[in-house]
Amino acid sequence: MAAHHLLLLLAALLPAAATADPDAVQDYCVPDAGGRGRPLELALLPSYPCRSPANLTAADFAFAGVRAAGNFSADTGFAGVSVTPSQFPALHTLGVSFARADLSAAGGVNPPHYHPRATETALVLAGRVYAGFVDSGGRIFAKVLEKGEVMVFPRAMVHFQMNVGDEPATVYGTFNSENPGIVRIPATVFGSGINGGVLERAFGLSPAELRRLEKRFGPPKTKLSEMDD
């Protein structure tokens, strides 16, 4: 019950969604990063010129990085591979990105999170997945998805996925933004360094309970609040 109340509260307090990606002014623009062999920085993509179409081949528009699962979390049984123009440059200016999510058998979970700049459609490629989202009015929409079924998660709505089958599950997600962003609720709330008094009062936690959650979701990287001094 407490977890349900947390989802309702967070859904009601989410910031307004950002505007959509700008319309493309050409067929495509595979950025020319000067032969760099590492992922491109999304923030720098507009500064790169487009490669000449005459020098492109079909291989520039194909990507093999989601053929296998990513690294699984021991805590959640979740493995994710996100693909934006940083990993797949041909997506640049097309207004789309995608991801592969794998859930270990019997309880693997993609914890509650949201994408501030994109709506997501999630296709179950294997397994049985309990998935859903909470709207800004606090109403939850959730059901078990079978292989071949799709669910849509509206932009900036908290959503989640959990394997409820006996076999590993795989979900393929697509986004209507090349940079959808992701805000992971547990880590954001309990691992970002929010003043402990705020969290204890907001969620009815004892100091010991809060310390346990902060330990699990990691210490803050920096302290930006004067109350933490």
Image (tube, grey):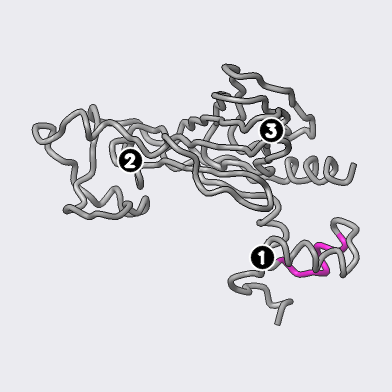
Q: Secondary structure at mark 3?
A: strand
The answer to which of marks 3 and 2 sits earlier in the sequence is 2
* Alpha carbon distance from label 3 to label 2: 28 Å
Residue at 54 percent across and 24 percent down: it is 125
The dot on residue 218 is 1
User: Tag 2: residue type?
Assistant: Phe
Residue 62 image offset from top left, x and y in percent? 29, 31
Relative side of 227 to 177, left or right: right
Q: Secondary structure at mark 2?
A: loop
198 in the magenta segment = yes
Eye-nearest disc, 3 or 2: 3
How many numbered marks does the figure carry?
3
Mark 3 neighbour density, 10 Å: few (under 14) some (14–19) many (20 or more): many
169 in the magenta segment = no
Relative side of 8 to 177, left or right: right
Q: Mark 3 sits on what residue?
A: 163
* Alpha carbon distance from label 2 to label 1: 30 Å
* Alpha carbon distance from label 1 to label 3: 25 Å
Eye-nearest disc, 1 or 3: 3
Residue at 66 percent across and 69 percent down: it is 219
